[in-house]
Image: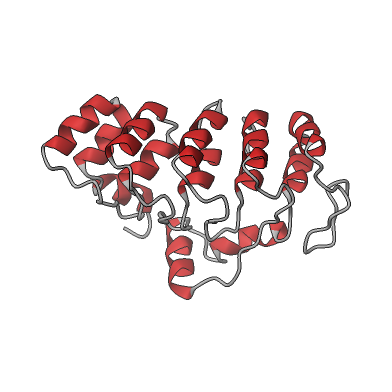
Amino acid sequence: RQAFPQYYTQAVRTPLMSATQSWTFEGVEQLLQAKANAEARDANGSSVFSVAISLHKRGTVAGWLARFPHWDLERRGGPVGGTVLVTSCLAFGPNKSQLARLLLDARADLNTRPYTGNTAITALCQKDDSDPDAIRLVVERRMDVDDPTSRGRDRSDRTRRANVWFGSPNGYFRNFAPWEGSIGLHRCALRGDVANIRVLMEVLSDPTLRNKQGLTAFD
């Protein structure tokens, strides 16, 4: 269980979670009508809804929000306390702005972060398939473009779970230490993402800001 947690997680997923991976929302709806537990989580702490978001299942996400209009969009899941909005920014596939727009229209909070400290913008900027339109969207919704990565204080229980899950004996959250205080420009500069750097500069990101290591994006 500890040596191969990814297989353990798959083993304890509910039929509803498996359906969310493979089916359209119509199939998911049939299971919900048969009293499948919409609140169930897997061993990783992920919910059915977060699985749909991480797989970029826009139709399922839209159907879920229509069926559960009061769903708590700020609940955390997974070993790093993933939030639905940041997860949507890290999801597989293009056109992340469409998925993010669904969540923001449903009143997802731009200020809620996972335990890694990622904001929606820093999450978007760390992906090779990032969507410049998604960056424009979250800025239009009044997110501070230069809001930095900030982990805060790690609780020992969540840190232990993450270390076991990711097989990181030296501490999973230490992997994020170099990014402390970094903004989207730092992430894009590391990857040489010129398209997103241009967008960030258009929305007046400050290239002189330094992270906790004292580095600007140019450095």
- Count all numbered tags in the image, as a single digit: 0
- Tell me where residue 160 appears, x and y as whole percent: 45, 69
The quarter of the picture where the N terminus appears is bottom left
Viewer-nearest residue: 66 or 216:
66
* In the rendered image, the vertical position of residue 67 relative to residue 142, given as above or below: above
Which color scheme is applied? secondary structure
Q: Position of residue 182 (x, y in %)?
A: 74, 55
Residue placed at 77% from the left, 47% from the top? 186
Q: Which of the two residues, 103 or 6, is positioned nearer the viewer here?
A: 103
Left or right for 183, reference 73: right
Please state if 10 lies on the left or on the right of 100 as rendered. left
Q: Is residue 104 left or right of residue 195?
A: left
Q: Quadrant of residue 126?
A: top right
Q: Position of residue 192 (x, y in %)?
A: 78, 35
Residue 126 seen: no
Left or right of 125 on screen, residue 41:
left
Q: Position of residue 6 (x, y in %)?
A: 37, 48
Q: Residue furthest left?
A: 34
Q: Can residue 196 be seen in this snapshot?
A: yes
Rendered residue at 48%/74% (across/down): 156
Vertical relation: 91 (above or below) 177: above
Q: Residue at horizontal 70%, vertical 61%? A: 180
Front-most of residues 156 and 82 = 82
